[in-house]
Each structure stands twice: as C-alpha cells, then as structure tokens.
Amino acid sequence: MEPDYLAQKVNRAISQKEKFGLNNATSWVGFQTTKSKGYTQSASGGILSTLLVKLLELNEIDGVLHAKQLEGNNNSPYFQAHLSKTIAEIHENRSSFYAPIDFSSALSSILSDDTLQSVAIVGTPCVISAIKRFYRLNTALKQKKILLFALVCGHNVNGQFADHLSNAIAGKNQSKRKLKFRDKEGISVASNFNNSVLFASGEKIAIDRFKSPFTVYWRTGAYALNGCNFCPDFWGEEADATFKDAWGISLIKKEGETAFAIKNPELIRLTKQLEQEGTIYLRQITNDKFATSQERTFYDKTDFIETRARHHQALKKNIDHKHRGLDFLILTIVYYIKQHIQIQSKRKFAKNRIYSPRVLKFLEFFIEYGEKFVLLKRRYNKKVKPTKEVIYTSGFGYRNIGDEAQLETNLQLWRKIAPEYKVTLLSPNPDYTRRIHGNFDILTASRNSFLGISGFDYLGLGDSRLFYPYYWLRKQIIWANAFMIKYLNRTIFIGPESSILLKRLKKADLLHIGGGGLFTGKTKSRLYDLSLLIRLAHYLHTNIILSGHNIGLWRNTQQKNALKKLKYAKIIGLRDNSGSIEALKKLRIYDQNKVIPLFDDALFCEGMPKAELEKHFSAQGINPNKKHIAINCYTTATIQKKVEEAIDKISAQLKPLSDEFEFIAISTHPVDEKINDYFRSKLPDTKILQHNDNTALVVSCFQHAHICITVRHHPIIFSMSGCVPTISFTFDDYYELKNFGALKLFGQGKQVFQYKKDTFKETFGPLLKRTLENRESISREIQLHLNEFSKNKGYIIKKYIEDYG
C-alpha cells in the first residue's frame, strides 16, 4: 500500500479501536447444520462456503475467486489463486491456507471473460483492499459486480512457513504432497486441530498443532511478512462481509463455528434466508463481542499499530501519536523481538530451524504477557472519558451573514451528530459571536492572536505587499513556541492569547475549518493564516477536517505552497465539484478518498417560518401579500464603477415589474448598505430590509423570494435552499469561481454571467425574462438536486466520527 493510503488506515485504527472496520455491520456466530459435503473440511463453521454456494445456486454470482490447494514441495507452491465456477469446486477449496497468494493472473482472466459478470472474491484484508482500489481505477472491472469476503487476519507468512511445517511433519524428501493447516479429523475441540500432510499415495501424517512447529512459530511471528507489521486492517475494512473462527466465544460444535460480520444488506437477507431454510444455525452477537473475541490479536493490529508505525520511515510522518511512556517502551521491545524472529526465520530457513523450542517459548511468553500487561494497564487507567473537543474556525465574526449561517449550521450539526464533542470557537470578535450564537467557549482567532497586535487583524497588513514578510517573521516565533508547547508545555516571547491557543490546539481532538473562499489567492491573508493553523494542528497531533470550501486561484509560488498544507487534512469538503478539484490536482494533493465535493455549509441553515417573516415585512412597510424579488449587491473600490453601471442597467430592466413585485435589497455585510442606497436611488420602489444581523430573517427572505438577483455567493445558497431561481452577475474571477460553482451544483450554471457593459442588454434582459417565465420548472429542477443533497446533510462530520472519532 502507498504510505499516505496506509497512514489513513493506521490513523482510523488508532482512533476507532474496536469499531475499526465494523461500522454499519451486523454480527453473528453460527455453523452449517447439514452434514453435506465438506463441513468438517472448513476451517471453522462452514458459513462462508454455504453463502458462496447459495449465491452460485441463485445465479447471483458466476464464480468465486479464492485460493486453491495444490500438491507442492520446497520447489513448488502449495496454494494458488483459483476461479471456482461450480459448487464442487467451492467445496473442494474450503479451509484456511496460510501463504501469500498472487491474484493478478486470476483477475486478468476475469477481466477478459465476458461470461463472468458477477464474481465473489475471498481474501485477506490486504487483498480485499487492493482489489477495492483496483475496482475504483479499472473501467473494465467496474462493469462487473463484485462481492468481497474478507478472512480475518492477524498476519500472513511467506512461502517458507508452509515448506518448514511440511518438512517438520513429513521430512525433507521432495515428493509432492498436500499440506493441511486445519485438519479436524478426530479432534475433541475446534481449537485443538491438527496439521497434516497427504501424499499422492494416500498416506497421511497428522500432528497436534501444539506439538508441531505451527503454533509457536505463528504466535512469535516467525516467517511473517514485514508489511504485516504495519497493516492495521484486522477485519477487512472494505469488505462486504468478514469471517473468522469463533475464538473467545463459547462453542457449541466441536467441529468449529464461524463468527462473522456483514455490511451488505443483500448478504444479510441471504443469511437470514439460509437460517429460515435450516441450512445454517445462527445467533446474533454485538459488534463489541465480535471485535473482542480475539482481544489481544485484535489490539495488536489496531491500537498497538502506532508503536510499530513509528519505526516506518514514511508512516511515522503521517500518523497520529497519542500513547507514550511505559506502554510505548514495552510494545517497542515486543516489536523488535518479533522483527528479529522474522529476520532470523528467513535467514536460517535452509537449516530448518530458527531457535531451540525452549528459546522460542520464552520469547512467546514475553510477547504475550508484554501485550497483556499493556491491555490490563489501559483497562485499569480507563476512567470516565473526558469530553472530546473540536476547535471550529472560519470567516465568521465580521457581521457577514453568510459566514454566520455557516457557523450556525455546523453548530447545529455538531450538537445533533456528536453531542459528546465540546465545540470551541475561534473568533476575531468574541463578544459579537456570543451575542449571535450563544455562550460558547470562544478563543481569539489566530489572525489576531498569532498574526495580529492590539486587536488589529494581521497588524492591518492583510492587503499589503508587506504582509508576507511580516507573516514569515511571526511564523518563526509561533513555530518555536509550538515546539516548546509540544515537549515542555511552555511558551516564550508570545502573548497569553497565542499561548492559550497553542495549548488548546494541542489538547483538542479536532480542528474543523468551516467553509468559504478562504483558501484562494484572493483572500491571501486568510490563506496563509489557516495554512499555518493546519500545519500547527498536524504538528501537535490534532486531526483536521474542512467543509464547504472553494480552493484555487493562487497568485504566486508562496500561495501555492501554502495551499499544499491541505494535504494534512483528514477530510476536505468542497462546495463545488469541478474548479476546486482541478486546483487540488494541480497541487498534486488530490485524494479521492478524502476530497468530498458536496455543497456550502449554509445550505441547510434554517430560516424563520413564513408567518414570522410576514410580520417583519409588515413592520417595515413591505407588502407581505405581494411577491418579492430579493436583491443583493456588493462592491469594492476596484469594481465600484462597474457595479454602479450594472445597477443602472438592472434597475431599468426591473422598473416595469414594480406593479407585480416588491423589490427588497438585502445586505449580508455592512459594506453592502452603501450600494443598497445607490440601488434605491435608481429604483425608488426598492425596500431595504432591516435585519440587525438576524441570520434567520435574512435566510428566510431569500428562501421565500420569487426570484433572486445577487452578486455575492451566500444569497445563492439561501435561495437554492428555498428552490428560488437565481441570477448571479459577477465582476471578477473570485466571485465567478464561487457563484458558478454554487449554481452549477443545482443545474443552474447558465444563470451566472460576468458583467460586460457592451453585452449586458443581450445577456441580462433575456435571462431575466426566461427566469420569470420558467420560474416553476426551474424551481422543480432545483428541488430535485436539493433532495439529493439533503441525504448528505452533515456528511463531513458523520464521516469524521465514523472514521476517526
């Protein structure tokens, strides 16, 4: 696996522990009830083989890709990948085969065989993960249906393991033979199986697994693959179903039982059908019971992976470090003992010995009880879990209704989805934020504490050429103190607000950066500010997620390098599905597993009921019984002349509609108020909504409009949430990126245009007419998209909780 992909798995395993790989799964213990061919040949209870046979009988699959037993010796393999197309073949290839299996040629045959349209694939978690990734990338395989069945895996071994075991049982002669790891013939209990060798002559030699080299070599990791040391995937995270022996769960059948978990609803229905038919016996268990049935092995793969990952040159840079002290020391010693045994087993294979059994027994004792000590210590120290903390920051705090709506939506989502998380806000104006959103724990935003002085954001240099040199100098001071905080919990030469923010950033579980155009060259000061915050959070081992962003439009190399810090985020949620993705690809940090194109955070911000909105209208002299057109304008010194020209022309187009509609100019930021006055001077019938930063009032006014005309981005979002047709005109590439991206999500890309004086009449007039005439059909189209988006409400937070929380 690539280091970045593997690091994501490692981090999920560390954070989720027993939930890792079992989200949305249903777990059972069971066994095959019939005495049909092969039950005693299965490694455990025969459930997997029964399911595969049933799928083939129902024509749900055309074949099964799994491992097949061969006659082998030291010079030829004992097992290989095989495609079974008949029930007899499935029965023949039951049981567990501990060896590396190459699936590449078998996969090639599946791709080239048009008769195979649906295939079940059985393999260890690493095989399942690789095939899943191949499926995403390969167009031909995507045309086929695949079902993935994972075999729970503590670790795999190289081919020498089978050779050594076979030689230990039957001698070094080179006659070909079949090797069976799980021979259950004549056993008294499922866990005490035999290892056996079967020659072509029919001669069979069987040895109790506790008397053969099998058990001690397996438990000490002899012949283990080095990659297994760094794989946290015990369950087969990406499989449709996962199967294991029912170790740790009371057994009814001496021949063995299967513990298994299924995520695929189709397979769950089939399992219940088999139970009703009497083919299998089932009893449902909790996922916790399933996860901890092999507790030490499981934690060795998941929670203990952090210690081993520190010894991996690529992984150690990208994993979350949490555990220290005695645990780390013991697990490090265990890791080096296991690694030494692995190395020695491969080097000394020719001599057919590793160490004397007495030495191996002693090492096995140290490994087992070292890991058990860590588990017991963790249980003993496990008190009431402290409240988890998420630090949330974005563009709020400047009386921008759009940014406040994003914050309000995310606060509601955190309360609903993960109430166990305490939300701490970073605001440049804590008093204002408390007045609008309530009495949250609020720290001074990094733009003030890290990069500002005496309440001035960025020392007032945010738009100056001097900003970057100033930022670079401040960054060195902050980084030095981040080092001090990380290792000494002390700071020097910085103010108390900066010190507090660094300490809280270290303590927090998550940094959530809410949406906006914060990661673009147009907002360079915020781009540098937040890229520094991301890098600090990563350095202090705090997870990072982003939601609802536009990314791109960098102006120089420094901005491009700052944007590359986004690679440290666990999840990147976008509010467009094209421009930002292309920007991430150009930065070479695009990862389809963590970049999620959705919508603006504020899309589901709640407005006030229509009856309450009408009361506000009546109080402000706006006729509540008359349809209204919501209008929002925005200007800066550089585009003011263009904006005024556009308003002159727009007001002339709207004037004939004054008998039918109320025109309501709505400011979403105090800077809009001046241009609203100009709009009213050109269109005297215009009413200006007085809202006193009441987010719900502003949102509701857009949601209940007949149509909306806007320059800014968030009026589009509010209008789309009410299925209101919207026309956007823009004056620069920054708003064109944001507004086009927002409207395109709802199939309304043609509703945005870049203002040009000489073509305005040909563009705006027909567009306005078409929008008014087709208002209902446009609204229905928006509704269809909104219905789809509503399914993913809060998806970024939910995904984080499932994967890392």
Image (cartoon, grey):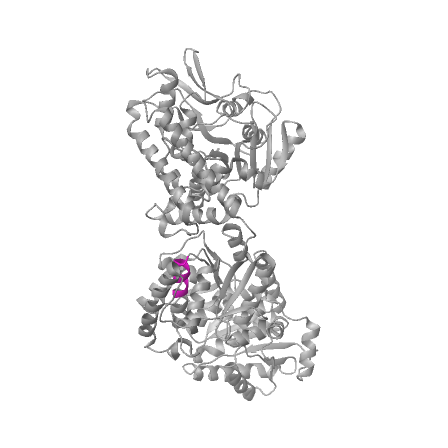
Q: Is residue 709 magenta?
A: no
Residue occupying image coordinates x 51% and y 83%: 647
Which segment did they paint magenta?
532-540
> Residue 249 location, x and y as percent?
58, 32
On screen, residue 184 above or below 109:
above
Q: Quadrant of the N terminus?
A: top left
Residue 471 visible within the image: yes
State which quadrant residue 668 falls in: bottom right
> Residue 208 location, x and y as percent?
46, 19
On screen, residue 588 above or below 97:
below
Q: For this view, does 41 lie left or right of residue 477?
A: right
> Residue 396 location, x and y as percent?
51, 72
Total marks drawn?
0
State which quadrant residue 563 falls in: bottom left
Q: For this view, does 343 lie left or right of residue 425?
A: left
Which is nearer the eye, 251 or 258? 251
On screen, residue 754 above or below 565:
below
> Residue 112 location, x and y as percent?
42, 35
Residue occupying image coordinates x 59% and y 33%: 29
Residue 234 visible within the image: no
On screen, residue 456 above or below 346:
below
Question: Magenta region's main secondary structure?
Answer: helix
Which is nearer the eye, 173 or 102? 173
Which is nearer the eye, 405 or 52? 405
